[in-house]
Amino acid sequence: MRQAVLNLEESMIRQVANAGMGRDDVLKFWFGESDEVTPQFIRDAAIASLQQGETFYAHNLGMPELRQAIADYSTGLRAASAATISMDRIAVTSGGVNALMLAVQALIDAGDEVVAVTPVWPNLIAQPAIMGGHVTCVSLRPVGGLWQLDMDELLASITDATKLLILNAPNNPTGWTLTRAEQATILAHCRRTGTWILADEVYERLYFEKTAACAAQCAPSFLDIAAPEDRLVVVHSFSKSFLMTGWRLGWLVMPPSMTPEIGKLVEFNTSCAPVFVQRAAVEAITRTADITPRVVAHLQACRDTLVPLLQAVPGVEVAAANGGMYAFFRLQDQALYGDSLATAKRLVVEAGLGLAPGNAFMVNPRPEAQGWLRWCFASQDLSRLGQGVARLEQWLGLYSKAVR
């Protein structure tokens, strides 16, 4: 087998989840999904499609009606000064993960230089490595209770030799979000160096701050400021904002000249997304007002419930999250707790608390990942968050006494 594949690490989040499989007493906050089922009207659209016998292949790029609905939706989110997003820039994919992989397959040759901002969901770093790319990481840092990007460090890392810059904002796991000024600076720099930008914006709508940059409440997007032919590929998904994680449907927005080439790659990867899933997606995206604002309001309530509770736990540091569905926090006595994967496994076994380890979101893993844990707070029952914090606090006290 290829060495790049052999070098891939098993998902650390899955390792933690496997440690708790079959245990009903574990409070599970490890995966990045809500525990709310997909709305009934979306499920009904898929059922109707199946009952009508729509079980055949679709166009590689997606059904025209869904591509147009996505284009209209994306345009509707943009500020008045932004360009219209046309259907010829849209490709429907079998999940956001597939969208990201297609983009990397299209852009990265073996030996190409890639820069990624971390901590970040591990797939974003693994995918260019699978293609033989060399990934350099620029780390966010918590400063004064907020996650911040050292712009000088990032720009210095992007040279004429850099083929691709990978950014995820709002960020998984930190909730960090790029500002409009930062996006403009990055875009201008990448135009000078000829670097492609792969922007993972799947959490765009899960944003808690008010902004004038977007017609709806959403995070700043590169699509607000980029020209259609800029070297920019933006990834979206139906998973988070539409409560459709298991449906595996996403989309790409890209330069029009790139779209036919992505269609070729779709053929060689998945051929197409299932028609009945696409029918459900048309219903979801055209009725987004019935879903997303409520989801965002609830997630904000979850965040505002969990974060103060964590901040009150001695020895815990939490940096603010402006978007997403996660609290990323640190156990301050790193010498005591050590490796975050081992800590997460102990929490499952000894406290019945399922969290994701911080070193799942770093390369190799880097020292700054140690001591960090990610908590997905997308819970319908807010009391579960309080129960989880109580278990964490009790375990911290018992563990500290046991090792000292």
Image (spheres, grey):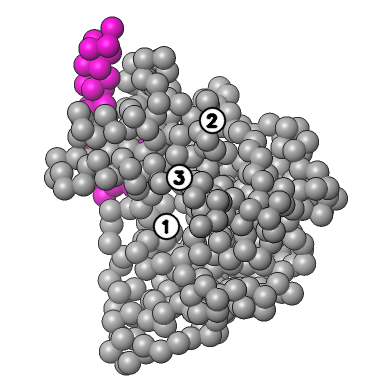
Residue depicted at x 20% and y 28%:
350
118 left or right, relative to 27: right
Q: Secondary structure at mark 1?
A: loop
Q: Nearer the viewer, mark 2 or mark 3?
A: 3
Q: Nearer the viewer, mark 1 or mark 3?
A: 3
Q: Which residue is mark 2?
A: 366
Q: Which mark is residue 130?
A: none
Task: Pick out the residue farthest to the top.
Answer: 404
Query: In x, y percent, where is residue 141?
Result: 58, 28
Q: Are marks 1 and 2 in contact (CB under 8 Å)?
A: no
Mark 2 nearby-residue class (10 Å; few <14, some 14–19, many ≥20): some
Q: Which mark is residue 240?
A: 1
Dot 2 or dot 3, earlier in sequence: 3
Residue depicted at x 56% and y 47%:
125
Q: Which amino acid, by three-letter code, is at mark 3?
A: Glu
Q: Which amino acid, by three-letter code, is at mark 1?
A: Lys
Q: Is residue 371 found inside the magenta-colored segment of the image?
A: no
Q: Nearer the viewer, mark 1 or mark 2?
A: 2
Label tally: 3
Task: Pick out the residue farthest to the front.
Answer: 1
User: Is residue 120 visible to the viewer in this orientation of the structure?
Assistant: yes
Mark 3 nearby-residue class (10 Å; few <14, some 14–19, many ≥20): few
Name the residue nearer the viewer: 220 or 194. 194
Dot 1 or dot 3, earlier in sequence: 3
Q: Which amino acid, by three-letter code, is at mark 2?
A: Arg
Q: Which residue is mark 3?
A: 9
Q: Secondary structure at mark 2?
A: loop
Q: Secondary structure at mark 3?
A: loop
Residue depicted at x 39% and y 76%:
277
- The segment highlighted magenta reads 375-404
Quote the CA–CA distance across marks 1 and 2.
28 Å
